[in-house]
Image (cartoon, rainbow, N blue to C red):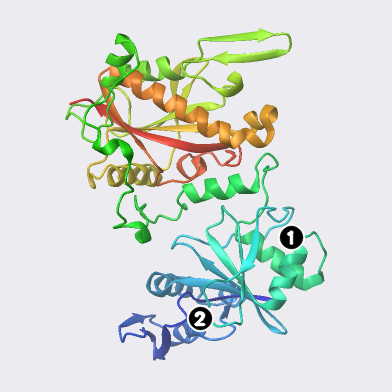
Amino acid sequence: MTVSLCLGDPAVRLTVDGAALLLVWPDGAQRRIDTAAAGVAAMAARLAGSPGLPEDNVLRSRDAARLFQVIERLRAAAGLAWELWGSAGRIARVEPAGPLFELAPPGDGRVLDPFCLLRARTDQDGGTTLPMVLEAPDIGCRVLLSPQGAALAAGLLAGVDGGTDAAALRSLLLRCGAGAGPRGFWSFADRVMHGASRPPDDGRPVDPLPPDRRGDPPPALPWQNAATATSAGGPAADDLLARRRSLRDFAPEPPTRAAVEAMLSRALACRSVRSLGTARWMERGFPSAGGLGEIAGYVVSRDVEGLEPGTWRHDPLADRLGRLGDRIDARLRLLDTAAVLLQRPGRPPPALLLLTARIDVLASKYGDLAYRLALLNAGAALTALQLAGDELGLGSCALGTAGVRRLSTLLCAPEHDDETEIMLAEIAFGVRR
């Protein structure tokens, strides 16, 4: 069994011209890539053939460094895919969902993700040689399968030992990221729903509206033609809620650390811990199922007076912010995406607040209701934060998603478990105008 690299776009024709490679697209567009070595060009040209360029050949090449550079240039031009070949032909093809996907090194000890979904392809551009596709909500690729590969994959998902061919496919799937984590508290539907609401961590820009939805007329709503609005609240509630607005433009002066800390303290800090018999619960500034304290807040600072740029976590028990190590590229991507979602591209907000939830904590008491309750709790916390910020002169706007899917992408904390603490809501904020 062989894992080979190949061009991601099978319609691109790749030819060798001495020490150079020539890429030709169906529309006639061309691109020339100089390799400075005829041997490297000849080996890289195998990416366009069958069975592609075996990984082992790349690693054993005397010009491995130069070959890797050429492969990366080809990836940027026409994409890259991986294929698994056996004695009977091609078994599987791995197609990345974005440009930053990479196969992980081979490893052992993991089991196949129980949330993998095997289904028939709805697109048949590549013919009928790979009629099935294997997907999982959290991996950044899809795996196209031949009939033989589909049979092997079905056996793997059912826990059947299919011999060496199945072991090779299992290894490939694990390298794609389909290794199971501590997910016993997730339901399949929740996993799919959460995966669909988060962009992949592959550097692609987040679009606030999917392309196939642009231009759709908004549905008619009964309140749109109402002449007046009425409220059943008292004077205090009327005053509080009447001032609440989602703001996309902020004052030029930055918010202060004191205001940010006060907002977090009023909304997220633990006010008391109570107990009754063996039950214990935390009381905070918002209603929360079970009072289990699974909601946490992270501040991504860009321009906050007294708060260095970076990522900070609010400790609800100590009621203070603590600096965390983060990845600058991921932090900037978060802020840039927020600017796009605010419809202010190029003008990121002074800061973002990320709300996360420990799903395993909720699942310990509520089982399959955990994800639904996490969404409800995060919504209540988000409202409390916005109202508290308004009282402190901070304007805010809740966002639908973020430019980073997982906390481990943002934080320099490899031990962080993305299956238990997940990002659910984001708020852009700054000083009210």
- The residue to which callout 1 is attached is 157
Give the mark nearer the N terminus: 2 vs 1.
2
Residue 265: % across, % down: 42, 15
Above or below, 352 against 69 in this view is above
**Residue occupying image coordinates x 45% and y 77%:** 9
Q: Residue at x 46, y 73 (%)?
A: 71
Q: Is residue 27 left or right of residue 98?
A: left
Report which residue position mark 2 lands on. 47
Q: Secondary structure at mark 1?
A: helix
Which of the two discs, 2 and 1, sits closer to the camera? Answer: 1
Q: Is residue 364 above or below residue 281?
A: below
Looking at numbered disc 1 in the image, what kind of residue is underneath it? Leu
Among the 4 quarters of the image, the one containing residue 85: bottom right
Q: Amino acid at mark 2?
A: Leu
Q: Quadrant of the N terminus?
A: bottom right
Q: Is residue 256 visible?
A: no
Image spot of residue 141 (x, y percent):
54, 62
**Separation of marks 2 and 1 at Cα, in angstroms:** 31 Å
Q: Which residue is pictured at 56% across the width and 52% down the height? A: 138
Q: Is residue 156 left or right of residue 235?
A: right
Q: Dividing the image into 4 quarters, which one contains the C terminus? A: top left
Percent of width and height locating residue 43: 51, 84
Judge the density around disc 2: few (<14), some (14-19), many (≥20) Cα neighbours within 10 Å: many
Q: Can residue 165 be spotted in the picture?
A: yes
Q: Is residue 117 above or below residue 169?
A: above
Residue toward you, 57 or 65: 57
Res 331 quadrant in image: top left
